[in-house]
Amino acid sequence: MKWQFDNDMPIYTQLVGQIKFAIVSGALLPGSRMMTVRDLALEAGVNPNTMQRALQQLEREGLVYSQRSSGRFVTEDVGVIDRAKAALAAEHIRRFRASMGSLGYSREEMIQLLEGSGEEEENG
Amino acid sequence: MDNCLECRGLTKRFGSVRALDNVNLTVRPGRVVGLLGPNGSGKTTLIKLCNGLLTPSDGAITVCGEAPGKRSKALVSYLPDRCCLPEWMSAKQLMDMYADFYADFDRARAEDMMARLNLSDKLLVGQMSKGTKEKVQLILVMSRRARLYLLDEPIGGVDPATRDYILETIIRNYDEDASVIISTHLISDVENVLDDVVFIRDGQVTLQASVDDLREQYGKSVDALFREVFRC
């Protein structure tokens, strides 16, 4: 996984976000086994306790689960993953509308622009 | 389990200078703690007190439940702020020496890390580059299965790649119930691997908090916060 951190947010929140993104985007497949906490921490260059805390949060959200002796896995429940994906999409849309709104675009104009940009990509 | 470090009203005077002034500090097991402060703030003095290399003028200090001394030294692995490896020794002789001195020295671990540095058996400390010496010294220190690692400026004066190597070596090797104290003023480099930070200024602890709590509270990195707090 590629890890990248902003300076103005807790590292733990960013770990949760990046692992969640890897799961909903399919980079981490449902049911697949995850690296150990320490290996994940080493790969990300973060403190193992911070990584542990992020994984516990993802466990509470049902996206990963741990099995006593065999390690930690991505959930097999595709419904949970789809709901997490929908929540992320809703968040992206909220932010998009907020920044377009502050540029002065109405809802209809945003939709027009979105459709237009889609055509451009398809044609180009 | 005992706290790895406990300071109560710890004070160290050199003549009329208060190098440490009424320091209260607790380090629980399993934490990586950054001891952060500008030059001359008292970081090395505190670490030397933990090691029993200095004695307190006032107050109390316990390391893994013991007063600094012979018994605490068996539990504490110390990386001094300068290279103190004998110039005439090879890596193998250094490992022999560590194995002699410390019952908790994990020779297999050290050999494995040394092998990855590709040092020839005949290469002496005096022939190593500065970066290599720092790596070798750190390998020796982190190959002990200690309860507390005291690392005084482990990343000062080395290139960024060596810095990454050193931080990775630290994170890879401490046991779950051991703690690591890293003194440095290069905060942005260590920030992501720390649990907690301790700001020290003119011999006084001005802040002790977790990195993520600080980021949450101030919306900025510890590095940015440090620059603000310690603006000259």
Image (cartoon, coloured by chain):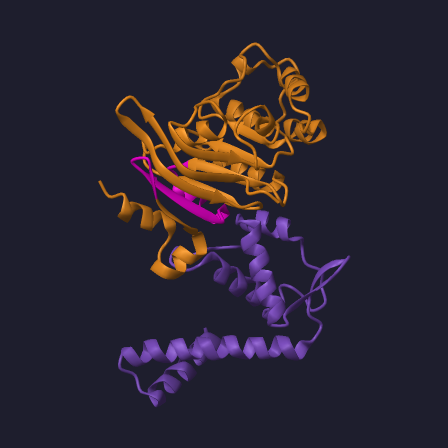
Q: Which residues are magenta?
A: B184-205
Residue at horizontal 42 percent and vertical 32 percent from the top? B46
Residue at horizontal 43 percent and vertical 42 percent from the top? B25
Residue at horizontal 37 percent and vertical 60 percent from the top? B217
Rendered-image quadrant of the N terminus of chain B: top right
Rendered-image quadrant of the C terminus of chain B: top left
Q: x and y percent of residue A114 in the render?
A: 41, 81
What chain is colored purple?
A
Give whichever of A26, B20 is nearer the camera: B20
Q: Quick one: which residue is furthest to the right in this view?
A: A69
Residue at horizontal 65 percent and vertical 24 percent from the top? B102
Q: Is residue B45 magenta?
A: no
Q: Is residue B138 left or right of residue B202?
A: right
Q: x and y percent of residue B208 in the render?
A: 40, 48
Image: B154 above or below B200: above
Image: A118 above or below B206: below
Q: From where the camera sits, is residue B18 visible?
A: yes
Give whichever of A90, B172 is nearer the camera: B172
What chain is colored orange?
B
Q: Is residue B108 left or right of residue B125?
A: right
Q: Quick one: which residue is furthest to the left in this view?
A: B232
Q: Is residue B207 left or right of residue B96?
A: left
Q: From where the camera sits, is residue A1 visible?
A: no
Q: x and y percent of residue B124 in the render?
A: 58, 13
Q: Is residue B194 left or right of residue B74?
A: left
Q: Quadrant of residue A67?
A: bottom right
Give whichever of B15, A77 is nearer the camera: B15
